[in-house]
Image (spheres, helix red, strand yellow):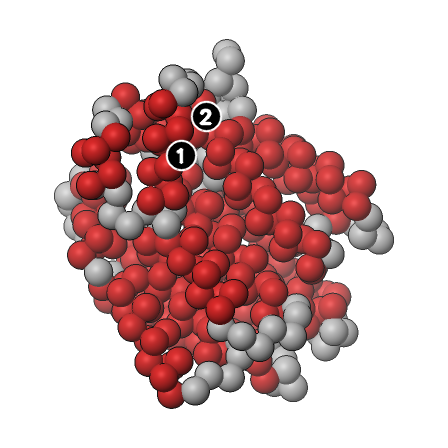
């Protein structure tokens, strides 16, 4: 656990004071190395290893479930007879590229602190497909919150690209109407895409696999889902300001979406928290950058981020999969 605390402290130090490209580069370099150099770390390690060892160009394509970009990574790795480690290298490269693009828009290194535990550690070191999808989604939302985007084309292309790594990303299309004004046909299109992401047979099959692997068929609940969503809720509350109607409505929509998901299925809420918390953080940072909220609220989120890391590593039964951190060359 000390290893991860040390990295978080470095990120916090980089976030202090005036933003600089050098500090941003250092922060991203550390995160890139953390993900790309990992060895037997995370509960999904052997799941991806099985996929690597049993890859078949035809059968794997038929079972890709629309996630063809990840299939391409598997295919290229197999054709070139590269080691399993290439999965983590591709994951780090693609994920970090989109987080760097995000950072170039928001220019706030503290964002990496806020997402460190849930996105970098829990996904980046384990759920590689959804990590990439989440990073792409974060960038897609960022260009609408921090820039004056007026077309839905960029968002549709990015969300489709994200879904080609993890199909659940399609469900996050529901945020688009809160980012820009849509006509009736566009509302209908976004509604269909979001429903496909939530209820498709593909995504539900992933839920079943998750339940079998981690809950051992005991019950369809994920105990930590509400805790993580409570953190997302706190960040939204700290960041909301009524005078900024766009981020205000977006924040409320995330709260409603999460509550409905949690009531229906906490495993689904667990999955989508990986998308919701970064978006909540973007709302907070945007309103802080616009001087609409006080800096004390940002400090609260720093404290929450530190406490969450400490509590998760001490209380979660899945923390053992991450400690000690093992380099692939060990």
Q: Is residue 219 above or below residue 80?
A: below
Q: Is residue 31 above or below residue 46?
A: below
Name the quadrant containing residue 77: top left
Residue 22 in view: yes
Total marks shown come to: 2
Which residue sits at x=65%, y=86%? 243
Q: Residues within 10 Å of mark 1 (few under 14, many from 20)?
A: some
The residues tagged by marks 2 and 1 sit, at their Cα atoms, a distance apart of: 9 Å
- Residue 297 screen position, x and y as percent: 68, 66
Secondary structure at badge 2 equals helix
Point out the residue furthest to the right here. 18
Q: Residues within 10 Å of mark 2 (few under 14, many from 20)?
A: some
Do tag 2 and tag 1 residues touch (Cβ < 8 Å)?
A: yes
Q: Quadrant of the N terminus?
A: top right
Q: Is residue 26 left or right of residue 42?
A: right
Secondary structure at badge 1 equals helix
* Residue bearing mark 1: 73
Q: Is residue 226 above or below residue 251?
A: above
Residue 230 in view: no
Q: Is residue 135 left or right of residue 202?
A: right
Which residue sits at x=60%, y=53%? 114
- Residue 199 screen position, x and y as percent: 22, 63
Which residue sits at x=44%, y=65%? 156
Name the quadrant containing residue 240: bottom right
- Residue 274 screen position, x and y as percent: 44, 53
Mark 2 or mark 1: name the one nearer the start of the chain. Answer: 1
* Residue bearing mark 2: 86
Which residue sits at x=37%, y=37%? 72
């Amino acid at each position: 656990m000390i290893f991860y605390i040390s990295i978080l402290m470095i990120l916090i130090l980089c976030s202090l004071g005036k933003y600089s490209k050098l500090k941003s580069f250092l922060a991203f370099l550390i995160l890139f190395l953390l993900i790309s150099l990992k060895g037997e770390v995370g509960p999904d390690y052997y799941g991806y290893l099985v996929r690597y060892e049993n890859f078949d160009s035809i059968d794997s394509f038929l079972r890709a479930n629309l996630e063809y970009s990840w299939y391409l990574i598997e295919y290229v790795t197999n054709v070139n007879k590269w080691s399993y480690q290439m999965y983590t290298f591709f994951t780090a490269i693609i994920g970090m590229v989109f987080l760097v693009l995000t950072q170039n828009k928001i220019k706030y290194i503290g964002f990496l602190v806020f997402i460190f535990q849930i996105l970098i550690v829990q996904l980046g070191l384990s759920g590689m497909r959804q990590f990439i999808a989440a990073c792409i989604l974060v960038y897609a939302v960022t260009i609408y919150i921090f820039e004056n985007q007026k077309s839905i084309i960029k968002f549709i292309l990015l969300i489709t690209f994200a879904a080609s790594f993890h199909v659940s990303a399609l469900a996050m299309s529901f945020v688009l109407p809160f980012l820009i004004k849509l006509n009736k046909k566009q509302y209908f299109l976004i509604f269909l895409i979001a429903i496909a992401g939530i209820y498709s047979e593909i995504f539900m099959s992933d839920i079943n696999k998750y339940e079998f692997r981690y809950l051992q068929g005991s019950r369809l609940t994920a105990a930590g889902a509400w805790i993580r969503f409570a953190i997302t809720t706190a960040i939204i509350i700290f960041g909301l300001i009524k005078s900024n109607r766009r981020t205000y409505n977006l924040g409320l929509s995330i709260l409603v979406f999460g509550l409905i998901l949690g009531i229906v299925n906490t495993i689904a809420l667990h999955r989508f928290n990986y998308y919701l918390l970064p978006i909540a953080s973007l709302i907070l940072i945007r309103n802080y950058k616009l001087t609409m909220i006080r800096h004390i609220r940002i400090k609260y989120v720093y404290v929450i981020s530190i406490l969450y890391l400490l509590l998760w590593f001490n209380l979660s039964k899945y923390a053992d999969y991450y400690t000690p951190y093992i380099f692939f060359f060990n």
